[in-house]
Image: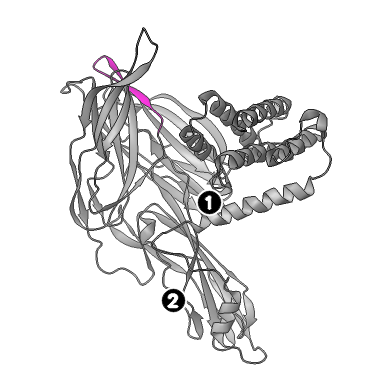
Amino acid sequence: MLSGICLAMSQPAPIRWEAAATSSVVLEGNPLEVSFTLFNAEAEDFKAPALAGFKILSGPEKRQSAYLQQGIPQREISYVYQLKPLKTGFSTIGAASVRIGEQWLYTRTLRIEYAPTTTMKPSEAWVEARPSELQTWVGAQVVTDFAAYLRNPQWSVQVQKAPDYAGMRAAPWEKLPDRTEQIQGFSYLIRTERVSLYPQKSGRLLIDPIQAEVLEWQRDSTTGLGHHTRRVKLASKPVFIDVKPLPPGAPRSFCGGVGYFDMEASCAPLQGSVQEAFTLNLSIIGTGDMARVEAPTLELPSGLKAWPSELTEERMLPSHRQQTFLKTFRYMLTATDTGRYTFRVAMSWFDPDSTAYRTIFSEPFTLMVTPGGDAVDAAAAVDALRPQKPTPNPVRRKSIGLAIAAGMLLVLALWYAWHFGGSHASEMSEQVPGAAYQEYLAQAAEHLQTGTMESFYQAIILAIYTFLQERYGLMPADWSKANAVKALTAQEVEASTVTQMEDILHTAETALYAKANQEAQAPAIYRQTAALLEQWHQNTTV
C-alpha cells in the first residue's frame, strides 16, 4: 500500500496523520521524498520509523502551512525526509507515530519500488502508467499516476485521449508539482497526471493507454511570433488490474466502504419524553469509494426506533496520496415507551490489508425517556425536528458540505459588515462605490491601526476573495488558493498578478490559522493588497 492515514475525528476539520511519498516508483540513483503529515492538530513526540534499507540524505525537515478548503481552515505540519534506497527492488517504510494529548496516532506503511535503469534505453520523451495496486477489491481506491518523462524541461504535454477506465469510476486529482530525475546521466523533467480509480466490478480490468503529444514552443526570429510544434506522440503501455469481489459474511453494520475508515457519533438530547425525537449524527471518514458508503444499520434496544437516515454533509478532505472523504448522516430516534435505553453505534468496512471486515464502536449512549403529555405521533415528532428541505439527489451526488461552507462564509461576511461598519481610516484607502471588497480593505486599515492582527488578516482574506467573487464569480464555497489560481488561470489573468495574490493569501492564512507572528509584515501586506486590488479593479472595469 502506497500510503496510509490514521484518523481522529474533530469537526469541522478532522485530525488526520498520513504518510506519503512523491512516487511509488523511484529510478535507481535518484532520491525519494517521504513526508509524514499531521492535519489540524499540534504535534507532540514525533517518532520516525526505523527506515531500514534507506540512506537518510536529509531530514526530518519540519514544514507548516495553513489554508482554506471549501471555506474551512486547514492546518498541516509535515516531517519530510529525503531518502535513498540501498538496493533495487521493493522496500517498506514502517509506521511513524505522533502524540496528540493522550492519544497516539500511527501511519500505515509505505511500499516503494527502487527500479534499476541498466536495461533502459531512454528516449527524448515517454509516458508510464503506474497504479498503486495490481490486485485489489471492488470499491477500493487505486491511485494511478501517468508520468511523462521529458528530456527538455521547456516541452509541454497535451493529452489527446484519456483512458476509458471501463468498469472503474475515475476521480482526477488537482495538478501535481513537477519533479526531476537523473537517468543514465541525463536529467528528465517528470510531469504527472494522477487519478484515483474505484473498481465497480470484479474481474480483470484494463487501464488502456493514455495518448498524448509533446509540444515545443518555437518563436520566429523575424516576426517574433511563436507557435507550438509537435515533437513526438506518446502512449503508455496498457495495464491490467485484477479485482476480487468482496467476500461473503459482511456484518449488518457494513457501510459499503472498502479501504481505511473511522467514525464519530453524537446524540442529543439524552433526556426527553415519548413525544420527542432524539437526533443521532454519525460522521464517517474514509479512503475508499465514498459513493458506495451508506449509513450503517443501527442495532437498537427494543422500544427504540431509528427512522430513515439523511445525508447532511459530504466533502473531500486534504490529502497528499489518497483521496479522503467525509460523510455525515443524521438519524432520528423515537421511543415507544418510557425507560432507560442504552446503545452503541457500530460501523463496519472491508480492510484490504487484512482482507477481512472490521468493526468499530462508538461510546455508549444512554437515553432517558420520560412520560409526555398528550400522545403525539412519532412520525410527527420526527418531522418537527427534520429540516424542511429537499432530499439530496443521489444521482448528482452534489456535496451538501459546499452549501454549508458557503452559508457559513456568508454569515461571516454579513457579521463583519455589521460589526465593523461605519467610518474607517479613509486616509489609507479610497472607497470605490459599489465595490464590496473596499469595505474589507477599510476594516483592515482600522484593525491595522488598533493592532488587532487576527481581525486584520481576516479582513485582508475577505477583501481578496470578495474581489474574486465580484470579478470572476468565485463563490464562497470555492474560496481557496488552489481554486483561485485555477479560476484566474482559466481567465488568462497575468501570472505576476496571480503570484502576488498567492503570496498575500499565504502570509495572511499563515498568520491567521498557524498563529504565526506576522505583525511586522502587516503594514506592507496592507499596502500590497490595496495597490494590487486597486490596479486590478481599474484593469477589469469597463
Question: What kind of residue is marked 2?
Answer: Glu
**Quick check: 425 left or right of 405?**
right
Q: Is residue 58 above or below residue 170?
A: above
Give me the C-alpha separation between circle 1 and circle 2: 26 Å
Q: Quadrant of residue 531?
A: top right
Which secondary structure lies at badge 1?
loop
Q: What is the span of residues highlighted in magenta in the rendered image?
A: 176-188
Q: Is residue 329 left or right of residue 184?
A: right
In this view, the residue farthest toward the top is 222
Q: Main secondary structure of the magenta part?
A: strand
- The reply to whether the C-beta atoms of the residues labelled 1 and 2 are less than 8 Å apart is no
Residue farthest to the right, as pictured: 423
Instruction: Give yes or no for residue 185 being in the magenta stretch.
Output: yes
Query: Which residue is disc 1 drawn over?
Result: 14
- Relative depth, front residue between 381 and 143: 381
Q: Earlier in the sequence, mark 1 or mark 2?
A: 1
Q: Badge 1: few (under 14), some or many (20 or more) residues near its Cα, within 10 Å?
A: some
Which residue shows up at 55% across the image and 40% down it?
A: 472
Q: Nearer the viewer, residue 262 or 496?
A: 496
Q: Circle 2 sits on which residue?
A: 299
Residue 254 falls within the magenta-colored stretch? no
The colour scheme used here is one colour
**Callout 1 amino acid:** Pro
Q: Position of residue 266 (x, y in %)?
A: 56, 66
Residue drawn where x is 76% and y is 36% of the image: 442
- Percent across and percent down for residue 45 are 54, 39
**Residue 59 seen in the current view:** yes
Tell which of 221 and 303 is nearer to you: 221
Q: Determine if residue 25 is in view.
A: no
In percent of width and height, residue 437 lies at: 68, 39
What is the secondary structure assignment of the residue under circle 2? loop
